């Protein structure tokens, strides 16, 4: 397809008057629970997707009912930082307007699922009361900026999260559409409105940024379009190594799509970050593919242009010459559950939330428990929550004397397991998939518990129960749980069937490889068992499963970690 033949989404953006489209008319239309086709594209920029409950789709079709239309809402929450008051508001919204659950995403944001069209405005309006918004959480713009979670390194953490905030603001669209549509803001005079960074058709595709702080790579920085790796000297962030061109999404049967690890292209000082970020964004704006959306991410732009040409363009646009990259190393990806004391004597509790879903069940009432925690800490200065890039949660800045009370609340609601998951569960991610995700081909979040039970039994049998293995499952090849950088990755192919990927690095610095295609659970375990048995017998001290598979050349093509 030529670059000139623009995709339909380009037409919609271009005609939208900076993201307004006919959203107001669609919301007012009482005949259907859906919005117009064109508006389904535009509403993404406002942080929402139109979905339908896929569990009842067929049944409703037979009864000649329209699909059970509902909306997912995603917050913009740089670094995943949220106050107790914001938590309580989201909890109330989840109970009043959504499906009585909060979903912590793999990009440190909240999602509400199951909001019907007639409640969207109320929900966004109520979020606004506590300074939360959903603007630019989805769509062809810079999305939620991710940031390393290490509140126990007080001052350094403040510097890096401060940068995440500034990046988020700098790259936020300037259109007044969000305020006008959702918050009844005054219509802006067209002549006064402009998008200096994005232009009127925004980016060719979504764009993602993360900031990492070695030695932890919890954000999986190399999976992002643009990344910044903090370089620390004498307890100051002196600058950042810049990474470009990471991305996970793949389309089956389209071999020209691929996951890609980002390249480290140089070093910048903190005052150069915004300029360089804007230059990367505008280069992608001008050179990205606007014809075929599946080839439009920055990773493809870079591979088409050539990395050196791309770097030159960014340097020219920003007026900044990148310095040579500084040495850095990562030791692991995930989070460390449990209490940790910070530099300033405050305490931080990381809870492992299975697949990021906060809800009440007979056995565990995480929604209720965290509501009670939020109420208990609401009036204590500086306390709050941090959503992690691994769908987990940190209760942060707790004075020593309050720890016991929090432990009590969590234990009363059956959350002991959230403190000390097995090493396997600690390194596991599963995307949302069914019933809300329109793209899902197989289950992920709902199937993971069952899969983990069987997998843990196998590990115990092989005496590997203490082995940390990065395991990630998605319901389709889009890669929302970043499966292509896991040691064991499963991507949905059809109900009950997955592609099996093996051999990613424990630190998020090596892609895995397709090992078997379209296999069911028994076949997955038949493939894993002999490899894990061999690992149990022949692994070296502290060796990780992915590295072992490479050392013994048990994969189709073995390569060293970068
Ligand atoms: Fe994602 C599309 C959920 C992180 C790659 N993603 C979707 C949609 C909106 C499905 C759709 O297009 O209709 C999913 C909504 C499901 C639902 O019911 O909630 C969805 N993605 C998610 C979340 C909620 C998964 C989770 O379990 O946490 C994550 C929300 C993050 C956030 O807060 O912003 C989520 N998605 C990711 C990531 C991981 C990351 O960014 O670190 C990736 C891979 C990285 C990347 O972008 O390369 C990812 N999502 C995709 C793609 C493939 C993009 C591509 O380049 O091909 C799609 C499909 C698309 O964009 O067309 C997609
Ligand atoms: Fe949906 Fe696929 Fe993303 Fe899972 S990976 S949430 S199935 S788009």
Image (cartoon, rainbow, N blue to C red):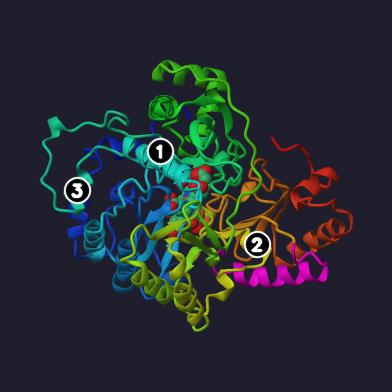
The image position of residue 513, as x and y in percent, is 71, 45
Sort mark 2 into few (<14), some (14-19) or many (20+) by Cα contacts within 10 Å.
many
The image position of residue 401, as x and y in percent, is 44, 69
Q: What residue range appears in magenta?
A: 443-466
Q: Give 358 or 300, whichever is nearer the viewer.
A: 358
The residue mark sitting in front, 2 or 1, is 1
Q: Mark 1 or mark 3, which is nearer the start of the sequence?
A: 1
The residue mark sitting in front, 2 or 3, is 3
- Magenta stretch containing residue 459, yes or no? yes
Q: Which residue is mark 1?
A: 163
**Which residue does the image show at 81% across and 71% down from the upper left?**
461
Q: Is residue 67 left or right of residue 309?
A: left
Sort mark 3 into few (<14), some (14-19) or many (20+) by Cα contacts within 10 Å.
some
Secondary element type, mark 1: helix
Q: Mark 3 or mark 2, which is nearer the start of the sequence?
A: 3
**Which residue does the image show at 23% across and 47% down from the upper left?**
178
Secondary element type, mark 3: helix
Above or below — where is 36 with respect to 558? Answer: below
Q: Which residue is mark 3?
A: 179
Q: Quadrant of residue 492?
A: bottom right
- Can residue 150 be seen here? yes
- Can residue 295 be seen here? no
The image position of residue 7, as x and y in percent, is 39, 36
The residue mark sitting in front, 3 or 1, is 1
Q: Is residue 195 left or right of residue 350?
A: left
The image position of residue 445, as x and y in percent, is 54, 65
Q: Mark 1 or mark 2, which is nearer the start of the sequence?
A: 1
| Quarter of the image with the C terminus in it | top right
Above or below — where is 474 with respect to 97? Answer: above
Mark 3: C-beta under 8 Å from nearest atom of ligand 1: no
Secondary element type, mark 2: strand
């Amino acid at each position: 397809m030529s670059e000139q033949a623009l995709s339909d989404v380009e037409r919609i953006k271009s005609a939208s008057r900076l993201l307004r489209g006919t959203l107001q008319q669609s919301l007012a239309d009482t005949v259907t629970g859906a919005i117009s086709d064109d508006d389904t594209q535009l509403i993404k920029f406002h942080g929402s997707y139109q979905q339908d409950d896929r569990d009842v789709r067929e049944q409703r079709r037979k009864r000649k009912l329209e699909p059970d239309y509902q909306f997912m809402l995603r917050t913009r929450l740089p670094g995943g930082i949220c106050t107790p008051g914001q938590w309580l508001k989201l909890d109330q919204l989840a109970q009043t307007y959504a499906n009585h659950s909060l979903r912590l995403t793999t990009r440190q944001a909240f999602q509400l699922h199951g909001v019907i069209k007639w409640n969207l405005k109320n929900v966004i309006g109520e979020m606004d009361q506590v300074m939360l918004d959903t603007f630019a959480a989805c769509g062809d713009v810079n999305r939620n900026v991710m940031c390393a979670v290490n509140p126990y390194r007080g001052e350094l953490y403040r510097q890096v999260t401060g940068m995440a905030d500034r990046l988020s603001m700098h790259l936020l669209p300037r259109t007044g559409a969000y305020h006008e549509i959702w918050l009844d803001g005054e219509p802006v005079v067209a002549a006064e409105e402009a998008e200096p960074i994005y232009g009127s058709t925004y980016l060719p595709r979504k764009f993602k940024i993360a900031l990492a702080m070695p030695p932890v790579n919890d954000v999986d920085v190399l999976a992002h379009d643009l990344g910044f790796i903090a370089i620390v000297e004498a307890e100051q962030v002196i600058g950042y190594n810049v990474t470009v061109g990471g991305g996970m999404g793949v389309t089956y049967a389209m071999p020209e799509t691929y996951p890609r690890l980002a390249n480290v292209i140089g070093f910048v000082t903190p005052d150069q970050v915004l300029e360089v970020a804007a230059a990367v964004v505008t280069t992608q704006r001008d050179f990205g593919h606007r014809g075929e959306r599946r080839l439009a991410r920055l990773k493809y732009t870079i591979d088409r242009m050539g990395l050196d040409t791309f770097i030159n363009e960014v340097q020219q646009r920003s007026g900044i010459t990148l310095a040579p990259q500084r040495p850095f190393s990562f030791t692991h990806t995930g989070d460390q559950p449990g209490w940790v004391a910070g530099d300033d004597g405050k305490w931080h509790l990381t809870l492992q939330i299975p697949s990021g879903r906060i809800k009440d069940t007979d056995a565990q009432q995480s929604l209720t428990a965290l509501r009670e925690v939020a109420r208990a800490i609401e009036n204590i200065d500086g306390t709050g929550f941090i959503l992690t890039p691994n769908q987990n949660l940190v209760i942060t800045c707790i004075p020593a004397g309050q720890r016991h009370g929090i432990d009590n609340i969590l234990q009363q609601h059956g959350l002991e397991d959230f403190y000390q998951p097995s090493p396997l569960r600690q390194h596991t991610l599963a995307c949302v998939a069914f019933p809300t995700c329109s793209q899902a081909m197989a289950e992920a979040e709902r199937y993971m518990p069952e899969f983990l039970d069987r997998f843990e039994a196998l590990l115990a049998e092989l005496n590997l129960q203490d082995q940390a293995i990065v395991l990630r499952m998605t319901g389709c090849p889009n890669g929302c749980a970043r499966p292509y950088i896991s040691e064991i990755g499963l991507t949905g192919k059809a109900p009950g069937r997955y592609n099996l990927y093996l051999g990613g690095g424990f630190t998020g610095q090596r892609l895995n490889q397709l090992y078997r295609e379209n296999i069911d659970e028994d076949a997955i375990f038949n493939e894993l068992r002999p490899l894990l048995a061999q690992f149990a017998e022949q692994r070296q001290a502290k060796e990780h499963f992915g590295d072992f598979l490479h050392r013994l050349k048990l994969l189709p093509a073995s390569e060293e970690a970068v």
